[in-house]
Structures are given as structure tokens and as C-alpha cells.
Amino acid sequence: MTDGDVPVRCPDCRREQLYAPPAYPCACGAPVVPPLARGAAAAPVTDRSWADEWVTVRCGSCGERSQWPQPELGCACGAVLRVPVVGGAGAGEAAGAGVRGGPRARPAFRPVTIRDARDVVTVVALYLRWLGYPNTRSAARRPPSGARISARGMLAQVEPAPRPIILRDIECLWLTAMAEAGDTPVACAFFSLSGYTAGARTGADTLGVPLFTLDLTGTPQPVNGAADELVATGA
């Protein structure tokens, strides 16, 4: 047992096992590990919502409070357990925090291995923070497929399904971003595991929508000029 390990007992089968939370890269480059609440009872995950899957944790190096995936542990009995975090606010509680924008020097993005659709959304949320959009949250309008992540000045769509993105997907995202803009400009970006059709790429270039692809290493790659520009300048 190491200092970071916490004993977690499954409320279903009563089996106890040790769990150490993963470290995530803060925008400053320091690793952030959600502090687990020792002795607090783990709860089985029965229903999923965005607010339950993210917690707000302060970086010990720079003091930035950001949202990170809620620690979870799979039990041998089949239950998925949500492990409580010390002082972890839900995603909705941190939505109004300040935003640090503008071009600035950034450390290299640290990828997170993709194992399932939840990891895809996590990687994109981390990548947006790395770009300078720290307070990511679930967008109010859900797309027909995939998920949308919003932050101040950005609306991103994530498609983990094994299908190429078509022009209509790009146009729907762009129109939604324009509708939500109001008096504050809202940029948009698309992230896909399976790439884009030629029509989607042409349309994205016309509309100025950055396109990214992801691989299972969790490394977003820019596909078009708008994406290259976003990576170069940040938020």
C-alpha cells in the first residue's frame, strides 16, 4: 500500500480493495491528483449525468481550480463505484469561475489513453483547457450523436462513434454556436475518432470550424488550417 492508495469497500459485495486515483495534467504542466476522502463510503454508479462525473480540484502548484473526472473504481462483482473526493465540487458549481484567456506559453499537452466513449469526452475537455478554455461543462443542447462541451467562448462537439463526420454535422454545430453567441462571440470546434468526409472538410474550411481527430493514445491532431491556428494561438 502506498501513500496514495485508499481502501474502498464495495457496498454490494462488501469486498475491499485498494485504489489510487489517476493524475491529470493541469494547464501549468503540474500533475493534479483528486484527493480521495479516506473512510468515506463509495457509492455504486447507477445513473450517469455530467454533473456527477466531474469534480472541481485545486492545483497545488498554480492554484487553478479546474474540473477533472470523478474517480471511479470497477469491482470484481461488476459494480462501478464512485469514490468520494475531499472538497470536490460538482461540475455545475464551478461553471461560473473565472477564465484565463489570451495567447500564452503552454506546456506540451499530456494525452490520456482512450478506452471508451467517456475517455473521449475527458480527453477533449482536457484539451480545451490546455487551449485556454478552463471551465468546460456539458452544453445545454445535446447533439443527435456524441456530446457537446461548452466553455466561455467555445462550443466543441465530440463524436466517439465509428462513423465519419459529414457536412451536416459541421453545419449543425456552427449554427448552434451562432445561435448561442448573443453579444459574446462563440467559436466552435469538432473532435472525431473516425475522421471527416471530403464535404465536411470543405464546409469546415468555408465556415472556419477547426477539425481535430483523436487516436486511442488520446492525442488530438489538427486536420485543417483553422485547427492549426487554434492550436497556435489558444483561446
Image: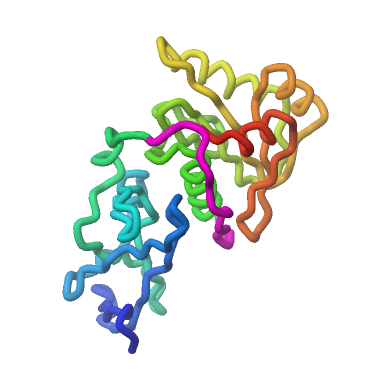
Against 53, residue 168 (above or below) is above
Query: Residue 208, percent across and down?
Result: 67, 21
Query: Residue 78, percent across and down?
Result: 41, 72
Residue at the (51%, 20%) spot, across then down: 177
Name which quarter of the figure residue 33 lies in: bottom left
Left or right, 151 with respect to 169, comes to left
Q: Quadrant of the N terminus?
A: bottom left
Front residue of 108 and 200: 108
Magenta residues, start to end: 100-115
Residue at the (33%, 82%) spot, across then down: 18
Name which quarter of the figure residue 137 lies in: top left
Query: Residue 165, percent across and down?
Result: 70, 34
Q: How is the image coloured?
A: rainbow
Against 146, residue 19 (above or below) is below
Residue at the farthest left position? 39
Left or right, 86 with respect to 122, comes to left
Q: How many marks?
A: 0
Against 77, residue 226 (above or below) is above
